[in-house]
Amino acid sequence: MAHYLVTGGAGFIGSHLVERLLIRGDAVRVVDNLSTGKRANLEAATAAARAAGANATPEFLEGDIVDPEVARRAAEGIDYVLHQAAIPSVPRSVADPITSNRANVDATLSMLVAARDAGVKRLVFAGSSSVYGDSPVMPKHEDMPARPLSPYALQKLVGEQYLQMFTSLYGLETVSTRYFNVFGPRQDPSSPYSGVISLFIRALADGQTPTVHGDGEQTRDFTYVANTVDGVLKAAVAPNVAGQVVNVATNGRVSLNQLLATLQRLMGTAITPSYGAARAGDVRDSQADITKAATLLGYAPTVSFDEGLRRTVDWAVGA
Ligand code: UD1
């Protein structure tokens, strides 16, 4: 049994990591300031793990890891840190770059220092496909130069570079997993900054008109959360990967118009979306090359886009 710390464990992706770790029988501590995370996510993760036969509960530390003392307490006795705490969202970072920088950069540095001082075996960081920016080369390969178009993308890039520096400077093992548009149950649709799949499902379920920013032909490598969890857990323990940056995605590419058509079929709706202006800082196309994850981590996606959407819709409509 290993001891895992999940920062942001009350958030969407964090709570799925917690659930899987509990099911595996690992010891889990969560630190979360509940700025975007919710206790209900942790409760749902614990209940799901219970239903799968686990009987442990995560230890919960409420606090902000930007405070070095909170980060220090969180890292105590930990083998692996899965650093998921962040203020996600490109548009939110455009509207308020200082607040998102504090959560995405300052808190990452604070956690790295605490992990180093606690002697943890490895820290895995939630990176982002947004760092690739608008390069027309597809699929996106880790060796491509980063071209951040938003404060969020830049902050995630700085986080990765801090990790690599901590590996070379202090010998702390780190891996950055670059996520691509993760979706699934427990993704919160309640903010205008929420992920597009959660927003579209909510709109269709409520009989409202979904809003498409732009012409809907932009594409994304939408990744069902169980695949992301697989990649992160492999990154925590794979040999010879310290200092690496690895895409964790599906290598698929779906347009927003295709996404909407699939959702309408699954949900039995026929609502015409409204089309508005493209969003500032938006990337046109995004698709991951996942060869490196396969080679270094032994990763392969196991839940298809369609199956993931089905599970997400079932959760959202309470089926
Ligand atoms: C970006 C990053 C992703 C990161 C995420 C954090 C890229 C390619 N991806 O996702 O890695 O984890 O930020 O939040 O940069 N849209 C609509 N209608 C809506 C909402 C969104 O049309 O109501 C559109 C957006 O303009 C965008 C697409 O849907 O073109 C996806 O948006 P969103 O789900 O917010 O994610 P990204 O910004 O792509």
Image: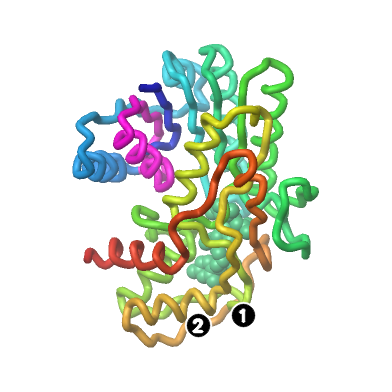
Residue receiving disc 1: 215
Vertical arrangement, residue 36 with respect to residue 306, above or below: above
Instruction: Name the one closer to the observer, 109 or 166.
Output: 166
Q: Residue at x 69, y 49 (%)?
A: 131
Vertical arrangement, residue 266 with respect to residue 111, above or below: below
Q: x, y (%) of residue 302?
A: 46, 55
Vertical arrangement, residue 267 with respect to residue 84, above or below: below
Label 1 secondary element: loop
Left or right of 215: which side holds 74? Answer: left
Outermost residue to the right: 145
Q: Residue at x 67, y 22 (%)?
A: 166
Residue 17 in the magenta stretch? The answer is yes
Quadrant in the picture for the C terminus = bottom left
Residue receiving disc 2: 274
Residue 79 in the magenta stretch? The answer is no
Amino acid carrying label 2: it is Ser
Amino acid carrying label 1: it is Asp
Q: Is residue 91 visible?
A: no
The residues colored magenta run 10-37
Instruction: Name the one closer to the observer, 270 or 229.
Output: 229
Q: x, y (%) of residue 169?
A: 73, 18
Q: Quadrant of residue 252?
A: bottom right
